[in-house]
Image: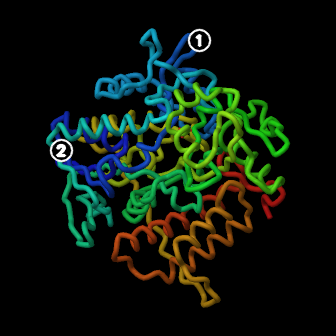
Amino acid sequence: MNVVVVGSGIAGLTAALHAHEAGHIVTIVTKGALGDGCTGFAQGGVAGVYGPGDSAERHAADTMDAGAGLSDAVAVEVLVEEGAARIAELIARGVAFDRGADDELLLGREAAHSHARIVHAGGDATGAAISRALVAAVRRTRITVTEQAFLADLIVTDGTVRGIRLLIDGTARALVADAVILATGGAGHLYAHTTNPVGTTGDGIAAALRAGAEVADLEFVQFHPTILAEGPAFLVSEAVRGEGATLIDDEGRRFTFDSHPDGELAPRDVVSRAIARQAGVQGSPVRLDATMLGARMLAARFPTIDRVTRKRGFDWAREPIPVTPAAHYLMGGVVTDLEGRSSVRGLFAVGEVARTGVHGANRLASNSLLEGAVFGARAAAALDRPWLRSRSVRLPRPETVPNRDRSAFDRTALQQLMWEEVGLIRTRDGLEHALAVVRDWRATAAAPSTAAEHEDANLLLLAEATASAALARTVSVGAHHLEPALIGV
Ligand code: SIN
């Protein structure tokens, strides 16, 4: 079978390697260079190695709790049951997870995990280690790799995906395929502040929407609580709090306990909102205090964060550092079954672009690399099995908007609008306002031709879908938080 994998993070690379090893003819198409994307930036690690007193059942229970009850229990069971095999596979492919003197894997802890169960590599450089190993594994095969290629659209005839349209150096190309596996990541650049690298513009979800694929849960956008509040967005891993660092207000008080009994290790959405509220009250960023961990430990366990914070003028072993939330992960996406099949025949989705049901309303930390590996492998295994599902949906056309004063569209204005109105704390009025503005912009947008214009069109499409989904969910749950005083207005 001729298989095209779009994207080259952990999910795409895993799917490509498994498909190749199963005898399929595989082409990886990627927007930047092979391995660019979110995976390489992941600091925390991969959840799924169980020490004494821990188990897959506990991991599943933590995942369900973090997902605020909206995770799919069967998908979660698959995730935790198959996680060990995928972690072993990463090790076999050359990922050197950190080990102690006894050669046992070192396990970290992050928010909302009841146990330390997260394997990491290079201290806080887990994603980079995984990306390096998988890219090297792909380079050792005969998988065709097409880099700097922008996914303009899916080719669909008679309800079946037949390939993709690409833009390479501004020139349109078509690539025919028997199956397409989307592994294009999320849409962090919908927001003014994000941990995601440039290029994370929701291209795969937008293409799937245009192809009539079912998409769900776009209202669930996870904001990471602790981004360094100085300079370009830089994530300070939750694992730092897992090791004992605290969040303090301008008087040195640990304010997160006002919101949740688990304080700094409460679910991410709770901690992020507590930080945003506190920063609003005090008029300056809250601070992350890691001084109790000591210079030697910080440098050894978190070498990347240590280097970047110092470069930006902070000695985090001596003084608390300013932090603020930023858009981090999209729980929703292209709806798939447990084998990564979307509702459009021949179209698979794996990793952040997919909505497998694992994450519910809020992803548990360090479950995303795991999900990419588990469901990437499952999609590849399903390639030549009978296609069991197909339920395309019709994409609503941009509304014709009556003439009224319009602000001009530019990407920065869209990102600011999304940050303010469709962000951490939402109101019904704000969501309606955002939706109206985005619809104005969409209704007057010219057909895209360059890659940047396609990205803008994708962001606008997703912004409309996200604001609509947020309006449709009238009750606060997980990462979707409506300001209580205004619910139902
Ligand atoms: C982190 O290291 O805090 C991020 C890990 C994740 O998003 O799962």
Determine the residue positioned at 78% across, 60% down.
Answer: 488
Q: Nearer the viewer, residue 483 or 298?
A: 298
Query: In the displayed structure, would residue 482 be above or below residue 136?
Result: below
In percent of width and height, residue 419 lies at 63, 62
- Please say which color scheme the image uses: rainbow
Q: Mark 1 belongs to which amino acid? A: Gly
Which mark is first along the chain, 1 or 2?
1
Determine the CA span between mark 2 and mark 1: 42 Å
Query: In the displayed structure, would residue 71 be above or below residue 170?
Result: above
Residue under label 1, please give it.
53
Q: Nearer the viewer, residue 419 or 465?
A: 419
In percent of width and height, residue 373 lies at 38, 35
Determine the residue positioned at 19% across, 34% down.
Answer: 22
Q: Mark 2 belongs to which amino acid? A: Ile
Quarter, ligand 1:
top right
In percent of width and height, residue 245 lies at 68, 31
Quarter residue 447 falls in = bottom left
Q: Secondary structure at mark 2?
A: loop
Of the 4 image quadrants, the one containing the N terminus is: top left
Q: Is residue 65 visible?
A: no
Determine the residue positioned at 61% across, 44% down.
Answer: 361
Can you tell me whether the CB of the residue at mark 1 lies under 8 Å from the nearest atom of ligand 1? Answer: no
Q: Is residue 319 visible?
A: yes
Q: Nearer the viewer, residue 289 or 174?
A: 289
- Judge the density around disc 1: few (<14), some (14-19), many (≥20) Cα neighbours within 10 Å: few
Determine whether, in the image, residue 142 is placed left or right of residue 201. left
